[in-house]
Image: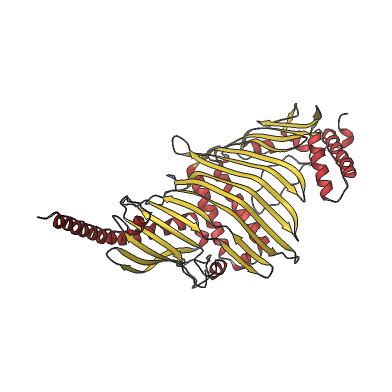
Amino acid sequence: MKKSQIAVGVIVALGVVWTGGSWYTGKQLEGRIADMVTQANAQMASTAPEAGIQLAYQDYQRGVFSSHLQMVVKPADGAKSSWLKPGQTVVLDEKVSHGPFPLASLKTFNLAPAMATVETVLVNNEASKPLFDLAKGQSPFDISTRISYSGDTRSDIALKPLNYEKGDEKVAFSGGEFQLDADQQGNVFALTGEAESGVINAVNEYNQKVQLTFNNLKTEGNSKLASFNERVGSQKLTLDKLAIAVEGKELAVMEGTTFDAKADLSKDGKTIDSSLDYTLNSLKLQGQDLGSGKLALKVGQIDGQAWHQFSQQYNGQVQALLAQPDIMQDPALYQQKVTEAFLAAAPLLLKGEPVITVAPLSWKNSKGESSFNLSLFLKDPAAASGEPKTLADEIDRSVKSLDSKLVIPMDMATELMTQVARLEGYQQADAEKLASQQVKGLAAMGQMFRITTQQDNNIQASLQYSNGQVTLNGDKMPLADFAGMFGVPDIAVPVPQGEPAPEQPQVAPLQPEDAPN
């Protein structure tokens, strides 16, 4: 047999295998889509019930080497409220290349076997038309997704450059590149990406031209679903510059912003240790350099099941609020109800007796750095017995101990207040004089009321609490005496609902003339 005939036979055989494999994986993918949609809807119902949306697919057309379908985001069945209007949909057009060697992957010389690759664009309809207007009639993004035989996915998301102008309104965006990795169940995912720049011009309620710009946005993060059905992971975001201008005059500039948040499981998988680190390298208001700041916050020992119960209760109450038109039409009332819902559910978070640490919250300028440090150990009030009869009883049900310290260099505070005075229109000399008077007056008042002390040209304060005893700047006293300094009475036994409260004993607050010299 001639070599050419053998080669043709091999090619034909490979073609048969490839065709059969593509047909099989295309059919297999069709079965997976329904599962993927079901999982996505379960995730949205669990983590974002207030969205009131669900995912579906339509117009599935399966071929040998490729298929076509549309994914549809629409209001959820039976939802009382939704991010989308009734009858409104967001439609994604999906072109699928079947494995084991998807043609779309071969174009990019990716020869690794895969179940399929999917090219996704947004469909222009009533809901998406504003985005198409910004993108000059094109889909504002392209998504290329590679689906492995295990069901894991990797999506390359390309945000298109935008350039839209209409009167005083303008949107300019450089575009961005992001990558999303997810496992088959949607329990684990990771997102990285960056966008170079963006500009938004608009007119505010005072008919002033406002411009918002940003430069070099980067993000990276990961998330996984814990056993108690809540997510843990990390997220880091950096932004080189964010600027706001009004009527062509620079109002505020933030440079070197970093936001780094983490939530890790303990070794037994039952509690969460979380942290938040925030850094701002420079803040300028109307050209005045106000300095830089940072925050390092840690919250440890959050009980996972309690966190899930808190989320369920709080989200359920918010969802109920969204279904009440009279509340939704009043922003102030809505915010009040949301706050009440949060406070009602918050005691659940104390079940694991969490520890809160701030080390530090600080602000720095050319004259020094102020800092605040806090360590707060909490208790589960549900474990307490009996009814609280005093303020100390009430506090001790939730607080195990507290230790805090504040240090403000007077030179630093004077420099900061000088810059604030300059913003208010004072000339430099007058601003320095006013700032000096304000800081010295604040220091004197703090000493007068025994709230702060002054040492080494620093305003200082320290506060410790444990078992009903307060130590304020080295002076130890019962909590009732400390509360009395601010006119807060000791509480009586709680009264059952519907009965009038007994008259509270009055404790006279500390007067300036009573303060030690």
Q: Position of residue 125 (x, y in %)?
A: 49, 72
Determine if residue 402 is in view. Answer: yes
Q: Which colour scheme is used?
A: secondary structure
5 with respect to 94 (left or right): left
Q: Which of 88 and 384 is in front in this view?
A: 88
For the N terminus, which image quadrant?
bottom left
Q: What residue is shown at x 67% (from left), y 34% (from top)?
A: 373
Give the answer, above or below, for where 445 lies relative to 100: above
Q: Which of 498 and 157 is in front in this view?
A: 157
Give the answer, above or below, for where 510 lies relative to 191: above
Determine if residue 385 is in view. Answer: no
71 with respect to 353 (left or right): left
* Quadrant of the rendered image containing residue 275: top right
Q: Where is residue 453 in the image (x, y as percent from the top left)?
A: 80, 30
* Quadrant of the rendered image containing residue 59: bottom left
Q: Where is residue 114 in the image (x, y as percent from the top left)?
A: 32, 53
Q: Position of residue 176 (x, y in %)?
A: 53, 55
427 with respect to 381 (left or right): right
Give the answer, above or below, for where 361 lies relative to 207: above
For the C terminus, which image quadrant?
top right
Q: Nearer the viewer, residue 359 or 159?
A: 159
153 with respect to 261 (left or right): left
| Total numbered labels placed on residues in the image | 0
Q: What residue is shown at x 29% (from left), y 61% (from top)?
A: 26
